[in-house]
Image (cartoon, rainbow, N blue to C red):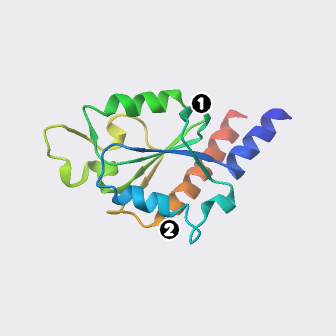
């Protein structure tokens, strides 16, 4: 009974944590735009939090480099299962225009597994919301498999 309530609440009210690996802030601005009254994702139960131990979904922007890959991995490891990762923007997907730089590891999937890719430079808030909805669909599939 309690487990089914928790699973249902994860789908109806996902808690997101956002981590910027070092982007130009374009993706960050668009991610935060989802919280403004124009898009207002909080009306759907989506909550942006700062603690990975309470998060269901990790949204990552920017290029992964050798200095921040350990922080990203640590954030991912602190999240409880089932957890999902959304990679935002061209830099998050592949390293973007910085992919050939000496200190860039590449996309987020070089460090942690990614469930949803949202392309764009920067992606629009509508695309980010679609990515979160797609991630919640994958979370529902994970919950069915674990049941």
Count residues near mark 1 (Cα–Cα under 10 Å), then give few for <14, some for 14-19, many for 20+.
Answer: some
Residue 75 at x, y = what percent? Answer: 46, 32
Quadrant that contains the N terminus: top right
Element type where label 2 sits in the image: helix
What residue lies at 43% left-to-right and 27% top-to-bottom? 74
Instruction: Give the residue at x 14% y 46%.
Output: 100
- Label 2 environment density (alpha carbons within 10 Å; few <14, some 14–19, many ≥20): some
> Image quarter for residue 134?
bottom right
Rendered view: 32 above or below 8? below
Is residue 42 toward the left or the right of residue 60 in the image?
right
x and y, in percent, of residue 22 in the image:
30, 45
Tag 1 near tag 2, CB within 8 Å: no
Q: Which numbered disc flags the more N-terminal residue, 1 or 2?
A: 1
Helix, strand or loop under label 1: loop
Label placed on residue 61: none
Residue 103, percent from left and from top: 17, 37
**What label sits on residue 80 in the rendered view?**
1
Query: For the point 35% across and 34% down, which residue is it?
Result: 111
Vertical side of 68 occupied by 88: above or below: below
Q: Residue furthest right?
A: 1
Q: Farthest residue toward the bottom? A: 38
Which numbered marker is on residue 126? 2
Image quadrant in which the C terminus is located: top right
Residue found at x 32% / y 32%: 69
What is the x, y in percent for residue 106?
Answer: 26, 42
Given residues 108 and 40, the one toward you in this image is 40
Q: Please give the count of numbered marks on the rendered protein.
A: 2
Using the numbered discs, state the Cα–Cα distance from disc 1 to disc 2 in whole angstroms. Answer: 27 Å
């Amino acid at each position: 009974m309690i487990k089914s309530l928790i699973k249902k609440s994860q789908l109806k009210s996902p808690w997101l944590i956002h981590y910027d690996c070092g982007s130009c802030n374009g993706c960050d601005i668009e991610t935060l735009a989802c919280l403004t009254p124009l898009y207002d994702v909080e009306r759907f139960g989506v909550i942006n939090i700062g603690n990975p131990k309470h998060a269901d979904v990790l949204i990552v922007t920017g290029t992964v480099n050798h200095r921040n890959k350990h922080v990203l991995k640590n954030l991912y490891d602190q999240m409880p299962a089932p957890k999902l990762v959304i990679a935002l923007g061209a830099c998050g997907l592949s390293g973007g225009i910085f992919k050939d730089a000496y200190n860039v590891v590449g996309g987020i999937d070089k460090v942690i597994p990614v469930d949803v890719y949202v392309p764009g430079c920067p992606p629009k808030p509508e695309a980010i919301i679609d990515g979160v909805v797609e991630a919640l669909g994958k979370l529902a599939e994970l919950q069915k498999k674990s049941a």
